[in-house]
Amino acid sequence: MINPYKIKLIALDVDHTLLNSKSEISEKNRKAVFDVVKEGVHVVIASGRSTPALYQVRKELGLLDENSYTVALNGAVILKGGEVLKEEKMDREDAIFLISELKKIPGISGNICLYNSHDSYLAEIETERLRNYGMRTGIMPVVVKNLQDSAADKVSKILVLSDENTLENAASIMAALVPSRNRNMFFTERHLLEFTTGGATKGRALRVVADMLNINEKHILSMGDNENDISMLEFSRFSFAPSNSSEGAKRAAKITTAESCDESAVAAVIEKYILGH
């Protein structure tokens, strides 16, 4: 039986959920997405990546048309086709404060990226870690002398790239500072720590998209693997975490799959819960 749970919308995280550990879309995942779209189900890409860094993923899945929705920068941006429908940004003063405090933490200065907008980002140094990140996402940073001086009036996101221990220490220090300024802080991978304005989460953005499509959350399925996915996993009636997910994502999801992102977990869920295979 096709779509026994009457799913009308699927929200998919990208890295380590839809993409495998080599940053590729498996043929199984690609086919499952194409098949479910043919059944009239909306597929929403929901990622921490910027909009240009999602272009190739959307293209491969045939999700560039004017009726396809995309959530980027962890909910800070909502696209319909190529049009920006909604943006949530933090004030320049808050961005400068966060960057200044981050630079005081050992091992962090030089590993900070600033997203003034949804389509580009800035860094002070193009480190090897940052080059690797840029190659993976397909978007390289613009190098500037000083991030604080380069901050726009409104800022979409701050990203920190470093080793796991350094970021855990940074998160511990920043935890006392972030809530007082109504900002979100979460790991999107073990080596990526991100900051957005308090109103920018994947869950809130998904609710906005669902309202635009007049779809109740009981007809929504979501999949994600990390802390930035928790809000949309909690919002959706059907939520899944691949087996490679963080413990936080697993707790938030209704079901943890037996399959990992390297075993086409997305296809496994779509086939079982919607396509009826």
Image: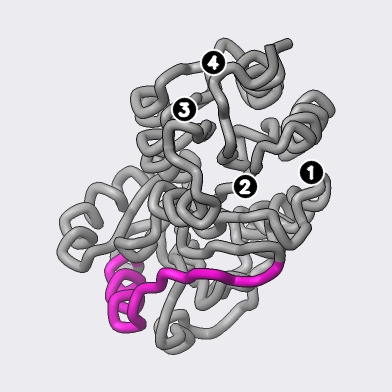
Residue annotated with mark 3: 239
What's under tag 1, amino acid-wise? Leu
Residue annotated with mark 1: 61
Q: Earlier in the sequence, mark 4 or mark 1?
A: 1
Q: Which mark is residue 257?
A: 4
Mark 2 to mark 3: distance in Å? 15 Å
- Whether residues under marks 2 and 1 lie with C-beta atoms below 8 angstroms apart, the answer is yes
Q: Nearer the viewer, mark 3 or mark 4?
A: 3
What's under tag 2, amino acid-wise? Ile
Provide the secondary structure element on which disc 2 rests.
Answer: strand
Residue annotated with mark 2: 45
Residue 68 percent across, percent down from the top left: 69, 54
Q: Residues within 10 Å of mark 4 (few under 14, many from 20)?
A: some
Q: Earlier in the sequence, mark 2 or mark 1?
A: 2
Q: Residues within 10 Å of mark 3 (few under 14, many from 20)?
A: many
Residue 76 percent across, percent down from the top left: 46, 63
Q: Earlier in the sequence, mark 2 or mark 4?
A: 2
101 shown above or below 172:
below
Provide the secondary structure element on which disc 4 rests.
Answer: loop
Provide the secondary structure element on which disc 1 rests.
Answer: loop
- Whether residues under marks 1 and 3 lie with C-beta atoms below 8 angstroms apart, the answer is no
